[in-house]
Image: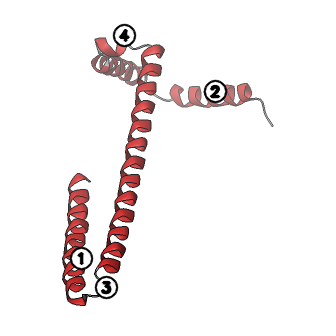
Amino acid sequence: MPEPEADISKEMGEANEVLEDIPTEVIQKTQTMMAIFGRMNSSPLADKVTGEHITRDQEIREKSIAFQHKETQTRHLLLFAGSVVAAILVVVILVLFRDNPNLIEKILYAAGGVLAGGIGGYGYGKSKRD
């Protein structure tokens, strides 16, 4: 495998050959334009940014991502706990009112409507957030 330095030297030699074919005034105009654009893109704030600033920004972003992950986990845990409580409540209602099927039907019908409305509201809220 050739040395990386040899590859760079070879590429620089090829670049110099190409540059020899370009008129000097074109090269000068290009250098002038690059200098102008370089000054235009430079800002006082960008000149003051250091490696420490970048490291601190990265740490803040990592903390934010960790917080968002924890928040999502908590939301999922609460949704699961709510589902378990609702299932237990349905079972309790079925056991308590097993002798009155008309009442069970009305209670489960109402609970189904609340559940469907909750699922629809959750989907609507999720689509609005995205």
How many residues crowd around disc 3 within 10 Å: few (fewer than 14), some, or many (20 or more)? few
Position in image of residue 119 (x %, y %)? 26, 67
The residue beneath circle 4 is 48
Front disc: 2 or 3: 3
Amino acid, disc 3? Arg
The amino acid marked with disc number 4 is Lys
User: Could you give the CA–CA distance between mark 3 and mark 4, rounded to whole angstroms?
Assistant: 75 Å
Is disc 2 in contact with disc 1, using a CB cutoff of under 8 Å?
no
Q: How far separated are the C-alphas under marks 3 and 1?
A: 18 Å
Residue at screen point 29% across, 15% down: 43
Secondary structure of the residue carrying numbered label 2:
helix
Residue farthest to the right, as pictured: 1
Q: What's the mark number on residue 59? A: none
The tag earlier along the polypeptide, 1 or 4, is 4
Write down the residue under mark 3: 98
Marks 2 and 4: which is nearer the front? Answer: 4
Q: Pick whichever of labels 3 and 1 is earlier in the sequence.
A: 3
Q: Which residue is mark 2?
A: 13
Type of residue at label 1? Gly
Q: Disc 2 versus disc 4: distance between alpha carbons?
A: 36 Å
Dividing the image into 4 quarters, which one contains the C terminus? Answer: bottom left
Disc 4 secondary structure class: helix
- The residue located at (45%, 27%) in the rendering is 58
Q: Which residue is mark 1?
A: 112
Q: Nearer the viewer, residue 65 or 1?
A: 65
Mark 1, secondary structure of its residue = helix
Q: Give whichever of 55, 12 is nearer the camera.
A: 55
Q: Position of residue 73 (x, y in %)?
A: 42, 48
How many marks can you see? 4
Give the image location of residue 108, x and y in percent: 24, 79
> Which residue is rendered at x = 37% and y = 43% of the image?
71
